[in-house]
Amino acid sequence: MTLTTEAGSAGTELKIVRGACPHDCPDTCAMLYHVKDGKLVDVKGDPDHPMTKGGLCVKLKNFPEHHYQSDRLLYPMRRVGAKGAGEFERITWDEALAEIKQRWTSIIEQYGSQAIMPHAYLGHQGVLNGLTSGDAFFNRLGASVAEKTYCESGSSTAWHMTVGGTGGLDIESMAHSKYIIVWGMNMTSTNLHGWPFLLQARKENGAKIVVIDPVRTRTARQADWHIPIRPGTDGALAMGLIHEIIAQGLTDTDYVERYTVGFDELAERAAKYPPERVEEITGIPAEDIRTLAREYATTQPAAIRQGVALERSRGGGQAIRAITCLPALVGAWRHVGGGTMEMPIWEFPTRFDKICMPEWIPEGTRVVNELDLGMALTGELDLDPPIMSLFVYNSNPVSQAPAQAKIMAGLRREDLFTVVSEHFITDTARFADLVLPATMQAEQLDIMVTWGHLYISLNQPAIEPPGECVPNVELFRRLAKTMGFDDDYWDRTDEQMLLDFHDWDAPALQGITFEQLKETGWARLNVGSPDTRAPHAEGNFPTPSGKCEFKSSLAENGNFVVPVWRSMYDGMQPGDPVDPLPDYVPPFESPDSSPELAKKYPLSIVSPKPHAFLNSQYGNAEDKKSVQGEQRVFLHPADAAERDVAAGDVVRVFNDRGGFEGPAVLDDGLIPGVVMANVGHWQNKASGSTVNSITADRHCTLGNAGVYSDNLVEVRKVASAG
Ligand SMILES: Nc1nc2c(c(=O)[nH]1)N[C@H]1C(S)=C(S)[C@@H](COP(=O)(O)OP(=O)(O)OC[C@H]3O[C@@H](n4cnc5c(=O)[nH]c(N)nc54)[C@H](O)[C@@H]3O)O[C@H]1N2
Ligand SMILES: Nc1nc2c(c(=O)[nH]1)N[C@H]1C(S)=C(S)[C@@H](COP(=O)(O)OP(=O)(O)OC[C@H]3O[C@@H](n4cnc5c(=O)[nH]c(N)nc54)[C@H](O)[C@@H]3O)O[C@H]1N2
Ligand code: SF4
Ligand SMILES: [Mo]
């Protein structure tokens, strides 16, 4: 476990232990923990890792202090004040577990086990402690199955429908690209370690970097061409590009004939989107659309880096379908550095069936989507039985899920028994009846999957957990014992579970062993070198037809959710068949698609990721707050002037669902009519609400993703600057 030791200054030994970043971030950096006298004194990026290259990001600066932060939860606690007040007293683990057993037993007797609902997302990204770490326990308990579609589910459904479960383009191969479209992604904040490969392509191949984003972000400012687009209209732009590529005779007909299905139907559909019509929808000049189509098709290898933001509106999944068709249309997949990247997680041979134990789900168990939490708790969903207990881990729904006011109203229900496993008393944990303390990354063992590159990494514990913190995997072992489950599942060590949870015989893991990972910390999957890898040069798409499906054969299954987000639950009710062809599906809310609503709420809002926080994590750390600043509201100067708002004035952003406040920043890098406010800030006592107070609890038409970029609001001045 210990990499090297050397004499420390006072004669004590400096121990260096290999780890990996725990966060929901495509970079999954390899880390070196520096430990002295049992204390974590520094954490550095591994200089040898081809992505990390020795550097971490602003969020992980002072990572040791995160572990020692004074407000960290160290012991189980029971609520003593009103729900939401955040007042707790220390109790023992035995008391906490006994209370859970007593409350759950009586809920199960009265309502049945489906009245209990887990709520989890990617607070931790490990195989043992991440997204699915509680699934086996809750499946065994017979709880409602939670559908976890906070992120990537719309993208992944669209991706599987079009190109199948392929890893797609490797970010490192983009060093070979000559034309790169960064579509709905703010890479220099959210995929920092991917960005240098684009810069390398620019330097060495003269690659042009194009950014498509409603906001002139820090990434857009560094691009060669920023194309501002109205939120939620990317589907129209992609259909317009398909139209132009075909109209200008720029398709790679040989590739299309050999390796795709549905070209004629796609061409017919795209004929509805001439550039002039697309200009009206997207706000992008028709001439720019023609230029983009020509440059993209004729400058090979051409790459597209798709951001998750693309899925955050009603038609987001369909937009991603259309975008994912582009590389096959122009034959970009033929080349190293050509194609498109959604997330390469599908290359990892993780045994989600062994982790989640879907066979333990009692037949007929219902599925409740986590983004419907407010509706589920307040009765709007009309669930029978109602949700009587919520168990939250790895997530902070009050901050990150839509319809914040509804969720808070639900969490205030006196008859709801809420348990939250956490590092801190977050905006969600404030409502808990019981809070349970969780370990942080330097204190636990795990294998990290990643959705941004092709390296597997092992995180090894470097220090002892403080107080009575436990890893999620141990939490669910304790709960299983408490509930009387005696399956072998709960008797294994962490290491044995990691061995069981991977297919070590899979081609991707050939030549890689667990023992070796203990030494090296990480290894590149056995998928070829980024300098030669061109996975679809000759088709080989893992779709039912083996081809890139412009016309999807999976569409007749309806709106499916890729199993990782749904506890591998196959018995889902098949939805209505969905459109087999990509198309532009207008937003639920926009001046164009809902003109009546726009009279009251004329502005579209986007709420992207904070630079210095990881979703809401670090939103309570003073050093990160000083980088990120307080919650601000970015307005175009013309929109501000219309509302008599000057820079620094405190404004309220609102719609019928709720509202939040912050000082205005005037920014001519926004499209007029678009407001921007970063997600992730914690509630302050004055406002009692944050960005997701205005977000609708509706879903994207594919993958049940959320619609964070599909909301109309109005802005009003509440106080003058100074
Ligand atoms: N610093 C930092 N890094 C992070 C995270 C974090 O919280 N902080 N979170 C991680 C997670 S969980 C994720 S999913 C990724 C997400 O990372 P990204 O994919 O970059 O997603 P966002 O930051 O939500 O949005 C990216 C950009 O999309 C734009 N955008 C919003 N709506 C639309 C639209 O409809 N069309 C287009 N074309 N653009 C739109 C926004 O203005 C924003 O600049 O980042 C990860 N990395
Ligand atoms: N408006 C708006 N809303 C969004 C988005 C957006 O762009 N705009 N993005 C969406 C996206 S892409 C995502 S991924 C989601 C993210 O939503 P969440 O996953 O809920 O985001 P986090 O704020 O990271 O919350 C994770 C919580 O888990 C806790 N945690 C971390 N590690 C552990 C652990 O090991 N054990 C336990 N028990 N707890 C742990 C952290 O302290 C933190 O409070 O938000 C979504 N919401
Ligand atoms: S948050 Fe992302 S960029 Fe920062 S250290 Fe972790 S993996 Fe690397
Ligand atoms: Mo995400």
Image (cartoon, rainbow, N blue to C red):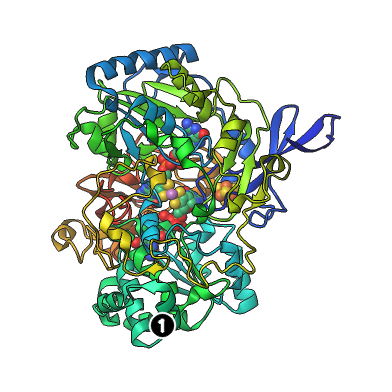
Q: Note whether residue 598 is visible.
A: yes
Tag count in the figure? 1
Q: What is the residue that sits farthest to the left in this orientation?
A: 596
Name which residue type carries label 1. Thr
Name the quadrant of the N terminus.
top right
Crowdedness of circle 1 by 10 Å Cα count: few (<14), some, many (20+)?
A: many
Query: Regarding mark 1 in the picture, which secondary structure is present there?
Result: loop
Residue, disc 1: 251
Looking at the picture, does residue 586 appear above or below residue 472?
below
Residue lying at 53% horizontally and 25% vertically, measured from the top left = 474
Where residue 419 appears, as percent x and y from the top left, is 38, 24
Looking at the picture, does residue 451 appear above or below residue 595?
above
Where residue 26 appears, as percent x and y from the top left, is 53, 53
Compare residues 135 and 342 and report the one nearer the observer: 135
Residue lying at 49% horizontally and 53% vertically, measured from the top left = 346
Residue lying at 56% horizontally and 57% vertically, measured from the top left = 192
Looking at the picture, does residue 587 appear above or below residue 658?
below
Compared across the picture, whether 517 is left or right of 490 comes to: right
Q: Note whether residue 665 is visible.
A: no
Where residue 155 appears, as percent x and y from the top left, is 38, 57
Compare residues 217 and 695 and report the one nearer the observer: 695
Residue lying at 41% horizontally and 56% vertically, measured from the top left = 308
